[in-house]
Image (tube, rainbow, N blue to C red):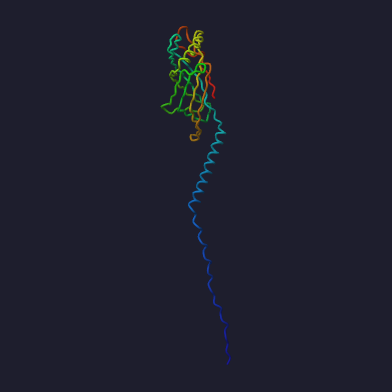
């Protein structure tokens, strides 16, 4: 009797996928804050650099100033009381084509040989805008600056000599706070000072009121 035997069939096992990797550790709040601060700093530097380059390209010029008229009254040389009054009209011009000026503060000072005589500080009650290549005129009545007796005598003594010749020379200084605006959003602020020399006010013989001789005067911007 012949017996046959079949070789054993190997058992097939299913292939198991590898286990998933462990999840990354959660980020700490400090790392999130550091990255947020770094992003904000980078954004600030980028915007500041872009604005700086834009102003270099625009190259804005400061406003130009001109005294259109100056009237001085109350100049009584023989009186011991020194009480001048003055009306001054100042033209402020914008020499830039693509930039708008916004002005919110005026300061005017009239001096005689460096001694302050008349002063006025004014904050406009409305928004003063000067478009590109435009101008704005402001007319102010200036208040008398208080002088001590020694300075008053010195001023009256010097003025008497000029007044007797028919004209007294004054100086004016303007201080204006200007905001430069380009493209409606890019802005910067600057305090601009101007000096207006040789404002020769002409007086008729015996008169206490005089007006600026020979029209307006161009001022130099400091």
Which residue is located at x 56 percent, y 78 percent?
A: 10
Q: Which residue is situated farthest in the top direction here?
A: 205
Q: Which residue is situated farthest in the front direction here?
A: 150
Question: Depth check: 90 or 16 in front?
Answer: 90
Question: Depth check: 20 or 167 in front?
Answer: 167
For residue 23, above or below residue 62 = below
Left/right placement of residue 7 relative to residue 205 reads: right
Which residue is located at x 49 percent, y 56 percent?
A: 26
> Where residue 84 sits in the image (x, y, percent)?
44, 15
Question: Depth check: 10 or 111 in front?
Answer: 111
- Figure quadrant of the C terminus: top right
- Figure quadrant of the N terminus: bottom right
Which residue is located at x 56 percent, y 81 percent?
A: 8
> Where residue 107 sits in the image (x, y, percent)?
47, 24
Q: Which residue is situated farthest in the left direction here?
A: 125
For residue 12, above or below residue 108 = below
Left/right placement of residue 52 relative to residue 139 reads: right
> Where residue 71 sits in the image (x, y, percent)?
46, 15
For residue 50, above or below residue 119 = below
Left/right placement of residue 124 relative to residue 192 reads: left
Query: How many badges with numbers are in the image?
Result: 0
> Where residue 125 sits in the image (x, y, percent)?
41, 27
């Amino acid at each position: 009797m012949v017996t046959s035997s079949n070789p054993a069939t190997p058992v097939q096992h299913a292939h198991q996928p590898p286990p998933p990797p462990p999840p990354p550790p959660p980020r700490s709040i400090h790392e999130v804050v550091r990255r947020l601060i770094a992003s904000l700093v980078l954004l600030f530097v980028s915007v500041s650099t872009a604005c700086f380059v834009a102003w270099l390209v625009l190259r804005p010029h400061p406003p130009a100033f001109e005294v259109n008229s100056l009237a001085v009254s109350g100049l009584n040389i023989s009186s011991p009381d020194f009480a001048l009054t003055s009306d001054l009209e100042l033209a402020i011009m914008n020499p830039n084509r693509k930039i708008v000026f916004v002005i919110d503060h005026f300061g005017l000072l009239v001096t005689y040989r460096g001694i302050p005589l008349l002063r006025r500080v004014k904050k406009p009650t409305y928004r003063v805008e000067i478009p590109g290549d435009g101008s704005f005129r402001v007319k102010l009545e200036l208040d008398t600056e208080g002088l001590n007796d020694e300075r008053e005598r010195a001023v009256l003594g010097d003025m008497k000599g000029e007044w007797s010749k028919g004209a007294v020379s004054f100086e004016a200084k303007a201080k204006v706070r200007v905001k430069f605006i380009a493209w409606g959003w890019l802005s910067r602020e600057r305090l601009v000072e101007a000096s207006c020399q040789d404002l020769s006010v002409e007086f008729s013989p015996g008169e206490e009121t005089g007006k600026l001789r020979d029209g307006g005067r161009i001022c130099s911007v400091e």
